[in-house]
Structure formats: C-alpha cells, structure tokens
C-alpha cells in the first residue's frame, strides 16, 4: 500500500440512501479539490459546492476537508457528501479515477495508512473492523474496548504482572545457594498465576474449567434430496468439491471441508462444512439408506445447520431437528420464480455470489459459541495470542508446588513465563510483523 499515491473510494454503505460519501486521501488531495470542486488550496472545514459529472450535468455536494496530520489517515483528506443514488455515486468515483493522480483504494487502505502514520494502533484498527461487522452486542463491547484503550490497558497490566513474577522467579535462581532468601513464596506464585489464567480465559472466551482448545464448529447442510445442498456446498467453498446431479441420492457420504469465514466476517474463524445425503421418509436402495443413517447421526452432533429447502416451507420430512440446534433456514435455488412461496428463510442462489455473503455472516453468528464479550471471542489474532499465553502459564504453574517452602524448578517456570510474554507482546505492540499487519487489514472492506 504505497502512501505516495492518492486514493479514493466510496466509504458509505452500498445501495441507495439519502446521502453517500466518497473519501479521497493522499498527496494530491488539495489539487484534486481545486481541480474537481473549485476549492482553494487553503480552504478548511465544510464547503458547499458542485461536482461536474459532464459538460451539461453537475450535482450539489458538501465537501469536508481535513488537512494533515490531523485527518483520519494522517494525510490530506477530503470527504465528498452527495445524494446517495448508486448510479450517481459510481459516476462521481469514475470521474475521479479517470485522473491519473488517483487510484482506487484497496480494502482497508485508509485504515492501513492511519496505522502507518501513527493515527491508529493495530488493535484500534481491529476495533474499527469489528465494530463495522458486529453481529451482536458482545462484539460491539469488544470493539469499544479495543477503540477506547481499555483492552490495551488490560494487556499491559497482564504483561507487567507476568514480567514482575518472571523477575522474582529469576531472582530465586540467582539466590539458589542462599536458603534464607526466597523472592516469592510458591503459594503466592501459584495463586498469582492462577488469577492471570482466569483473566486470560475470560478474555479469550474459553471455558475456565478445562484446557483451551481450538475445535472447529461443524456446520451441516441438511434437507430433502435435490434440495440444492451440494451446489450450495460447492458455492460456499468456491470449488467443485461435491458431485451435483438432478438425480436424487447422488450424495452417498458426508463430505467435509474447512470454510474460512474471516475473509468475509472479521473476527470469524474456520468452520467444518459438511454436505450430507438428502433425508427422506424412504430410501432408494440399501446404500442410500446407509447414507441417510450416517447423515442423521452427524446431524445430532452438529453445532449449526443450514436447512435447505427450495420450496420455502421447511417441513421436517424424514428427519428430526435437535431441539437445541442453531438452525439457519435457507431457501435454495432462489433464482427460480418464487410465486406464492412463503416468505421465510434466507433466499440464496448457489450461482449468484451476491447472495452468499449474508449466508456466511449468518453462519459466523450461529457458530459464535464462545461466551462473553472479550476481544478474544471475536478477533482470531487476539484469541490465538491469549490462548498461547494461557498454555504457557499453565505449563509453568504445573511446576509450582503451592505447599513447598521454595520453588523447585525456577528455570522451567521462567521459560514458560517468557513464552507467555512473547505471546502477549504482539498484542501490546512490541511485535508487529508484516504478515500480522497484512492479516489485520485484509479483513476490511473497500472505503475503510
């Protein structure tokens, strides 16, 4: 993302609305405002003017000008507010992009420039992405914690506490030949490590009763034969994994593939998508009967279900839905005329990519099984770091006998605490490798 260029993009939500906004940022912004909007280079604040679409057409606009370094990106920036018709907005953007000084912004490029120019921390940028994509109140609370600095303060407090304990443990190594010098009692160390583990577990959204695991939620496609399950399975994966045929009973096994939702829904993870045989009251043959029996057994243990029915009636014929299931009703084959079909379920066409985004977001919502509103529940990068720290501290704590008079294995404990500090270092800004930065901004949409 070269910061020497000037970028532009539509920064308001897609679709028609009373108002829309195009953002322009970069070294040529002042000249662009002058040439396209007749705004003097030294103008500030909000300016009413007109944008010329052609020799015979122009529209009224309100231009907000933000000089560097106090803009969102840290660069000279203008925001052009205009009537929100999709066609008009696209025409204005096209006129701007005809100028060789301007290029279309990449996904997340405005926020990436804000980060590069010191206007945002990496966690604050993640907070913006999470707020935009929030599907429930917990995600909004986590986004607020990222944006207002409360989460960063918690991370630094954990790092300070672990560093303090590490110093005391290492001091015990230095004074190992002096029995009367005990920098920290084993009982105190054991209790303090346990308190930090509880905090980290709560923030990561994991159960505090057992080991933190990274199991993928299972999402099954269920429905009658020829309900469009396999076509939808292929469409969600972006590849032809399942055989598709108009002949009933084509799917004879449970096909499993990993579906990464993070590209579409910031904060989401990977789920296991499972295409099952069609379920009906009767089977075609013995092989189909076995396939249906397998499908019913997998259905009972699924975390979420895509109930596929092109009729929109969603009648349970041939199977019983578990009472506690997370169910997403999907009216497949939505490209066919709806007629007098009931208005229920998500209308999805496997051959229309524009209908798949809503379904992916619904899957992400249904599989958000972690409890709480901690940042680690919703942001995979933070969840991985928190869980790595939890594992390291737990390993260190197993070496501490709270009833002993002195610490028996201080070197091993110190190693575990250093690993925890390394894991949390990425969250407090001490470690920000390029691949981490790239992953963060890859979750953004164009215009943000």
Image: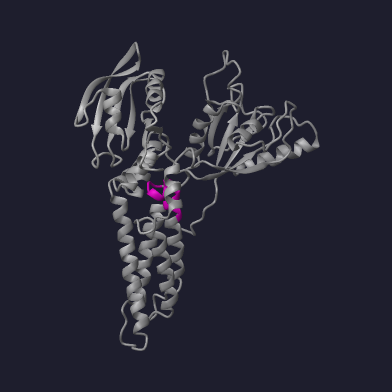
Where residue 166 appears, as percent x and y from the top left, is 35, 71
Taken as a whole, is the magenta stretch helix, strand or loop?
Answer: helix
Q: What range is drawn magenta here?
A: 372-384
Kindly tell me whether residue 292 is visible in this rendering: yes
Residue 224, placed above or below residue 393: above
Residue 187, placed above or below residue 316: below
Where residue 16 appears, as percent x and y from the top left, is 39, 20
Where residue 274 appears, as percent x and y from the top left, is 63, 40
State the residue at coordinates (31%, 16%): 59
Where residue 281 appears, as percent x and y from the top left, is 71, 29
**Displayed quadrant of residue 160:** bottom left
Q: Does the magenta stretch include residue 376?
A: yes
- Residue sitting nearer the eye, 152 or 284: 152
Residue 366, placed above or below residue 97: below
State the residue at coordinates (39%, 55%): 432
Residue at the extreme right: 285
Image quarter (top left, top right, bottom left or bottom right) of the N terminus = top left
């Amino acid at each position: 993302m070269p910061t020497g260029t000037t970028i532009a993009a539509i920064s308001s939500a897609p679709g028609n609305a009373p108002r829309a906004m195009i953002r322009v940022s970069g070294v040529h912004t002042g000249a662009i405002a002058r040439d396209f909007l007749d705004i003097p280079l030294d103008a500030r604040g909000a300016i009413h003017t007109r944008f010329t679409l052609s020799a015979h057409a122009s529209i009224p606009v309100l231009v907000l000008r933000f000089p560097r370094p106090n803009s969102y990106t840290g660069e000279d920036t203008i925001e052009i507010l205009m009537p929100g018709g999709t066609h008009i907005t696209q025409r204005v953007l096209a006129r701007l992009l005809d100028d060789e000084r301007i290029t279309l912004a990449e996904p997340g490029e405005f926020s990436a420039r804000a980060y590069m120019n010191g206007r945002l921390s990496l966690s604050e940028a993640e907070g913006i992405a999470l707020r935009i994509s929030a599907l429930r109140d917990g995600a909004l609370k986590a986004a607020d914690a990222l944006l207002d600095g409360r989460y960063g303060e918690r991370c630094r407090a954990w790092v300070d506490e672990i560093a303090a304990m590490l110093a005391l443990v290492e001091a015990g190594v230095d004074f190992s030949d002096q029995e009367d010098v005990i920098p920290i009692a084993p009982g105190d160390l054991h209790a303090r490590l346990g308190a930090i583990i509880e905090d980290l577990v709560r923030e990561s959204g994991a159960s505090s009763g057992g080991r933190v695991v990274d199991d993928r939620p299972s999402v099954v496609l269920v429905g009658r034969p020829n309900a469009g399950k396999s076509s939808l399975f292929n469409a969600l994966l972006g590849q032809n994994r399942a055989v598709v045929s108009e002949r009933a009973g084509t799917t004879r096994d449970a096909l499993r593939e990993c579906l990464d939702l993070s590209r579409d829904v910031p904060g989401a993870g990977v789920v296991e998508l499972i295409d099952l045989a069609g379920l009906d009251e009767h089977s075609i043959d013995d092989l189909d009967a076995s396939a249906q029996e397998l499908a019913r057994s997998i259905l009972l243990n699924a975390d979420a279900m895509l109930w596929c029915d092109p009729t929109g009636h969603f009648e349970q014929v041939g199977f019983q839905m578990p009472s506690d299931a997370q169910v997403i009703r999907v009216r497949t084959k939505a490209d066919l005329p709806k007629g007098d079909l009931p208005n229920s379920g998500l209308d999805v066409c496997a051959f229309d990519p524009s209908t798949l985004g809503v379904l992916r977001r619904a899957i992400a919502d249904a599989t958000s099984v972690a409890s709480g509103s901690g940042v680690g529940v919703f942001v995979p990068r933070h969840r991985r770091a928190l869980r790595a720290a939890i594992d390291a501290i737990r390993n260190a704590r197993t070496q501490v006998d709270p009833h002993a008079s002195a610490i028996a294995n201080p070197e091993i404990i110190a190693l575990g605490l250093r690993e925890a500090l390394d894991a949390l270092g990425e969250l407090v800004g001490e470690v920000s490798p390029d691949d981490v930065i790239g992953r963060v901004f890859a979750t953004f949409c164009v215009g943000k």
